[in-house]
Amino acid sequence: MTTFDKREEGFEKAFALDEETRFRALARRNKKLGLWAAEKLGLSGEEALAYAKAVVEADLEEAGDEDVFRKLRADFDAKQVDVSDHQIRRNMDEFLAAAAAEVKSGS
């Protein structure tokens, strides 16, 4: 194996690790977001956990965050919960930062 091949393999492994870390952080963010939204929707206990799981699953519909945003927006609108688009997106950003830090720290 040449030095170039070893270097390429190293980059591929680093990329795979970065993608796995990103996926784990997004899943953790979505769970946090789901629990926050569940509280706003008046859900608690098992219902809140089931709702958070549904938010995590909603992120698998398409690439990006719009599928999660649309789910939350539709659920808030259906229950007539007054939460702005800005607040949803701000919480998405804040929870992602917290989740990424948790995943990197191993907690």
Image (spheres, grey):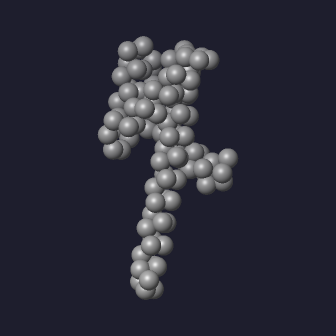
How many marks overall? 0
Q: Residue at x 38, y 41 (%)?
A: 65
Q: To which quarter of the image does residue 78 belong? A: top left
Q: Residue at x 45, y 17 (%)?
A: 81
Q: Residue at x 42, y 13 (%)?
A: 79
Q: Position of residue 21 (x, y in %)?
A: 52, 53
**Relative to 57, residue 80 above or below:** above
**Relative to 53, residue 28 above or below:** below
Q: Position of residue 106 (x, y in %)?
A: 66, 51
Q: Residue furthest bottom?
A: 2
Along the viewing direction, whichever of 21 and 87 lies nearer the viewer? 21
Q: Position of residue 83 (x, y in %)?
A: 45, 25
Q: Residue furthest front?
A: 1
**Relative to 42, residue 4 above or below:** below
- Position of the N terminus, as image quadrant, is bottom left
Residue 84 shows up from this direction: no
Q: Position of residue 73 (x, y in %)?
A: 38, 26
Q: Residue at x 43, y 67 (%)?
A: 12
Side of 53 relative to 46 (left or right): left
Residue 52 shows up from this direction: yes
